[in-house]
Amino acid sequence: MAKVSALVFAAYLATGFTGGSASAQTLGFGAIGNGNGNGNGNIGIGNGNLNGNGNTGYGNGNGNGNGNGAMSSGGNLGAFNTGTGNVGAFNSGTGNTGAFNGQGNTSPTSGNNNTGAFNGNLNTGAYNGNGNTGAFNGNMNGGNFNGNGNIGAFNGNLNGNPTLRPR
């Protein structure tokens, strides 16, 4: 009789004192060890969410949603990056860090290796808008080898554009 009483008590505990039905799973095994180690080590936006929830039984829903966004899509880290080796958000080109760098260039040799925000964008020609640090540097250059290596803000813009020259 003592074994039956212990089994009934275990079922009572597993149902959470609410009077719910006790299944074979809840008789002594309950929801033990579920939903652990989820949503860790993610980079970017919207990774590793809503994992390991609503489990019954033993050892379910563990280790989900971990390590997302790391070195995927051309080695980019962050959100909405295209190109290769970009870190941050909304970067294109190669090796840009920050936000909105290297966008809208006509040559793959332009808009690369910028750090900060809004650097090396909308360049035509070749080797324009590279290696800038700060904000709003090396943008909207035409020709070749313009708007490179600037530090600070609003430097190296609008160079080499025949349509923007004074008449």
Image: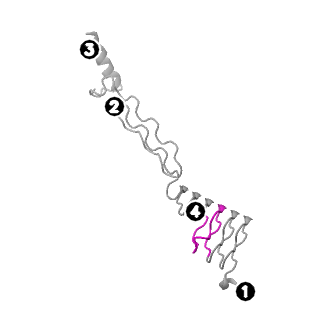
Question: What mark, if any, has residue 121 been given in the picture?
Answer: none
Give the answer, above or below, for where 6 lies relative to 59: above
Q: What is the distance, in whole Å, between disc 4 and disc 3 at their CAs?
A: 66 Å
| Earlier sequence position, callout 3 versus callout 1 | 3
Q: What is the distance, in whole Å, between disc 3 and disc 1 at their CAs?
A: 97 Å
Disc 2 vs disc 3: Cβ atoms closer than 8 Å?
A: no
Give the answer, above or below, for where 28 lies relative to 93: above
Residue, disc 4: 91
Residue, disc 1: 166
Residue type beneath disc 4: Asn
Crowding at dot 4, Cα within 10 Å, few <14 / some 14-19 / many 20+, comes out as: many
Element marked by disc 3? helix
Of labels 3 and 1, the one closer to you: 1
In the image, 163: left or right of 92? right
| Earlier sequence position, callout 1 versus callout 2 | 2
**Secondary structure, magenta segment, majority class:** loop
Considering the image in quadrants, where does the N terminus appear?
top left
Give the answer, above or below, for where 3 lies relative to 67: above
Report the magenta residues as a range.
100-123
| Earlier sequence position, callout 1 versus callout 4 | 4
Crowding at dot 1, Cα within 10 Å, few <14 / some 14-19 / many 20+, comes out as: few
